[in-house]
Amino acid sequence: MNETDVKELFASVAAHPAADTIDMDAVLRGGRRRHRTRVAATLGASAAALAVVGALLSGVLPTSSPDPVGPTPTGTAWPSPALAQARIAVTPNQAQQELPAARAAWAARPAATVDYRLTVRRESQAAPVRADSEVSGGEVTDYDVFTDPRKPGSVPEQLPDDAGAGLPRTVPELLDLVASYADAAGLTVVFDRFGVPVRIDVDPNAGAVDDEQTLTVAWSRPGDLEVPSGPGPWTLIPRTDPFPTDGLRDGIYTGSRAVVASDGRGVGIYLTLWGSSSCPAQPTTLTFVEPSEPQLGQTEVAAEVLVGPDQPDTRPCSADLSGTTYWAPLPASYAAKLPSSPPALGGPSALTHLELVLTGGAGSSSVTAGGLLTSRATS
Amino acid sequence: MGTQGDTDFLGWVSTSRAGLRTSAFLLCGDWFLADDLVQETLTRVFGAWGRVSGSGDPSPYARKVLINLYLDHRRRPSRRETPAADLPERTIEQPNAVDGDRDRLMAGLRQVPKGQRAVLVLRYWDDLSIEQTAQILGTTASNVRSQASRGLETLRAVLGTDHATTTPKEAL
């Protein structure tokens, strides 16, 4: 098959076009609306940038993340010194001003992190990719590129190395990339306390269409990526294992998400905590407290979860805002009360509400996050 | 955008519309979806008409928007499809040899991964160079070569050997 064959093939399949259904009135209306929106967006860019600064400095997470466990929820991050010490630049100029300090912080990093592993995820109009590299003595000793599927349980497929073209392989290359965006139309960079740009949102050219991209970065010492399960009933769910993420639509907590589900693991609670992927917070206990009086015929149960610190003083923690998911079994007495999907609200025998209260946090800080969950059994 | 801008835009649409529709159809394999993609493309081009027309030929911009919409669409649920409780009644069309051939070719084309298909359409239907294709797709020339080569291999595999007259490298 050569070029002519392909042309003939294309001509053949497109030989009899269907009637044209394009609505030009809609095109003109929509185009004018987009034009007005673009003008308004330009005028509002400064205000938006300030809002980003305010939101990030107050601990509010970005609204989206390419993390495979799902989008980062809007709300306060699980308290973590790794995140609290992040520095944020929201313009190309600010990013350039931050670079010397970032390079200095990286150069002065602890000796234990001279060699490191780096994961860079790219989210753009093209299919998302993830590049993993290992750096030893400043040289890249291992490099792999994968697809970056969003659905939990999806196994990334390895791609040729050139699929990661343009993705930095080392932290200095990341910093050089930030430097190369000096003339970008828009740039927001989050530097962690070691000077690593752990999130880069860039719009390189205001005149180009859909060239915006987001890089999120996780890094750690070699061997630190495996997170041990803590004490108590909670089991770490590997990122490549399937698990439900949407059994509870109203179950978004600040910095966490809980899903009650019945699946191959049994009936249990999936709890995702967003924060540092290399030093994730870990739930350690799970205690159920049943109210003395049922509410409106529904069973409402409070589950108290103690969350351990993310060990910021002993490990280099990435401020990459990634989710880590744990599972704990639901006691049989409650599991038996789970309604079939969808839940029958008000059913006298159904466990229709489960309130999860998380207590703990990094260092000396403490937070209680709660909310009302509607339990749902999924197959 | 003033009246002159509208007139210029509509003039450009009259010459580009059919080509964009065909390219969209070759990408997605469905005329209705192709019209959706082209309508959204035209909307975006018109929204940026002042800037786009000022830079010369708007067609490369439109092509890039179309490709991005196509690639993006493939990752999103259909906007046109709506769930229905009952299946609609359909007439059974009598197959004929021409339609059968076309269906076989279309089915083969559908088996080419979307990235490779985008390269094939840009290279062999829109007659763009490797460099122009790379620029629209935001990738490297070597990646375009490789995707085109793989796309041809896939086509050859799914359509049988009757088209296998040259190697992919020769075709580039």
Image: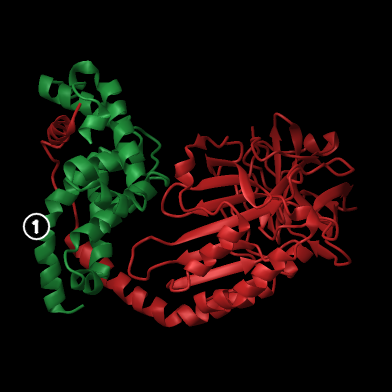
Chain colours: A red, B green
* A17 in relation to B133, above or below: above
| Element class at badge 1 | helix
Residue at (51, 53) in percent of width and height: A167
Residue A354 appears in the figure: yes
| Image quadrant assignment for residue A243 | top right
Quadrant of the frame with the N terminus of chain A: top left
Residue at (28, 57) in percent of width and height: B40
Foreground residue among B21 and A157: A157
Image coordinates for residue A274, horizontal then vertical, percent: 70, 55
The residue wearing badge 1 is B15
Residue at (14, 41) in percent of width and height: A18
Foreground residue among A15 and A23: A15
Residue at (69, 74) in percent of width and height: A58
Foreground residue among B44 and A310: A310
Residue B31 appears in the figure: no
Would residue B57 appear left or right of A353 to someone viewing this image?
left
Quadrant of the frame with the C terminus of chain A: top right
Classed neighbour count for the residue bearing mark 1: other residues with Cα under 10 Å, few (<14), some (14–19), many (≥20): few
* B92 in relation to B84, above or below: above
Would residue A67 appear left or right of A129 to someone viewing this image?
right
| Image quadrant assignment for residue B165 | top left
Image coordinates for residue A39, horizontal then vertical, percent: 35, 78
Foreground residue among A269 and A35: A35
Would residue A259 appear left or right of B153 to someone viewing this image?
right
| Image quadrant assignment for residue A44 | bottom left
Image coordinates for residue A368, horizontal then vertical, percent: 82, 63
Q: Chain of mark 1?
A: B
* A98 in relation to B104, above or below: below
Q: Number of numbered discs present?
A: 1
